[in-house]
Image (tube, rainbow, N blue to C red):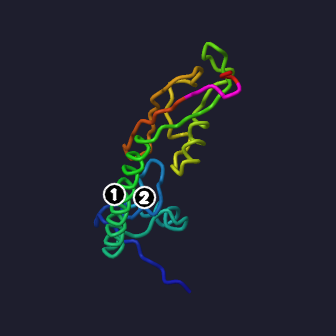
Amino acid sequence: MPRKTRIKSVEPGSRRRITELLLAERVANLGEQGEIVRVRAGYARNYLIPHGYATIATEHNKRMVDLHRLRQVDAEKDKVKNLKSLADSISKYSVTIEANANSDGQLYGSILAADISKQLKAANFAVEPGHIKLDGPLKETGMFSVRIDLGFSVETEAKVWVVPKAADAK
């Protein structure tokens, strides 16, 4: 039989029993994961703890959350470092996309972020269509500078060459 944990009142002598909890998950209108919040004992006992949204804020739990945050910060630094090297590589690479075009250079279709992402993935760059920020679809041949937002405030630009297909050039 599991041992019952007694929720102690933080404010002795008060009619309202308040307790400190450590949030295990984000709870709307209360706080984010890892935050220490003060709530009424009944809310903690009847809702937050049984549903696994929170745990009692012991010193051990607080230390564990701090260690977890440090590990997350280190992991984020590594990810930013990798994204910066990816951004540097992408900025030195130019994408060439062949498309059907008329003699004036107008495309019969258009080039979208998915098309650019497909070409970058073929060159072993992990760039999703959502990372590519276009003002609108590319509808003519030529060289375009496309902004790529990789996240974590890492941005770069890639050169995209839109050229007519070889059969159209003749």
Q: Secondary structure at mark 2?
A: loop
Q: Is residue 100 left or right of residue 154?
A: right
> Residue 157's spot in the image, x, y percent?
42, 36
> Residue 159's spot in the image, x, y percent?
46, 33
Q: Are marks 1 and 2 in contact (CB under 8 Å)?
A: no
**Residue type (three-letter) at the residue carrying disc 2:** Gln
> Residue 106's spot in the image, x, y percent?
62, 17
Q: Magenta segment, which residues? A: 162-167
**Residue 149 versus residue 85 in the image, above or below:** above
Q: Secondary structure at mark 1?
A: helix
Residue at 48 percent across and 80 percent down: it is 4
**Residue type (three-letter) at the residue carrying disc 1:** Lys
Q: Within 10 Å of the Cα at label 1, are there few (<14), some (14-19), or many (20+) other Cα atoms?
A: few
Residue at 38 percent across and 46 percent down: it is 88
The first of marks 1 and 2 along the sequence is: 2
Observer-nearest of 31 and 67: 67
Residue at 55 percent across and 64 percent down: it is 51
State which quarter of the image contains the N terminus.
bottom right
Q: Residue furthest top?
A: 104
Residue, disc 2: 33
- Please identify the quarter of the rendering in which residue 108 is found: top right
Residue, disc 1: 77
> Residue 38's spot in the image, x, y percent?
35, 59
